[in-house]
Amino acid sequence: MDDELSQRIAALSGREREIFRMIGRGLSSKEIAVSLCISKRTVDHHREKMLRKLNLSGFAQLIALAAYFVSSLPE
């Protein structure tokens, strides 16, 4: 992963990083909302903020990046 992208991921808020990891593990917005005891709308709002902060053009890119990121984490 390039340094600029790593810096952008690091700049996400704690909640955004938490949701980012959950997206990377394949959870849907509804599943994330239930797990975190927040509304689906709140999850969707965080997703939109992540798209802007990471300079991505769509949710498919966010899913792919999150999956790549999660797969590269040590277990």
Image (cartoon, rainbow, N blue to C red):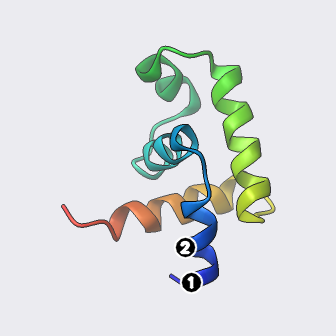
Is 24 left or right of 57, judged from the image as shown? left
Instruction: Give the quarter of the image for residue 65.
Output: bottom right
Amino acid type at mark 2: Ser
- Between marks 1 and 2, how big is the CA–CA gap? 5 Å
Q: Secondary structure at mark 2?
A: helix
Relative image position of residue 1 (x, y in whole percent): 50, 82
Q: Give the residue furthest to the bottom.
A: 2
Residue 6 percent across, percent down from the top left: 54, 73
Do the residues under discs 1 and 2 have CB atoms within 8 angstroms? Answer: yes
**Dot 1 surroundings within 10 Å: few (below 14), some, or many (20 or more)?**
few
Q: Which mark is residue 3?
A: 1
Q: Amino acid at mark 1?
A: Asp
Relative to 50, 66 lies left or right = left
Give me the residue at 51% from left, 43% from top. Answer: 14
Image coordinates for residue 73, horizontal then vertical, percent:
31, 66
The residue tagged 2 is 6
* Position of 23 relative to 38 (above/below): below
Horizontal side of residue 59 vs 10, given as left or right: right
| SS under mark 1 | helix
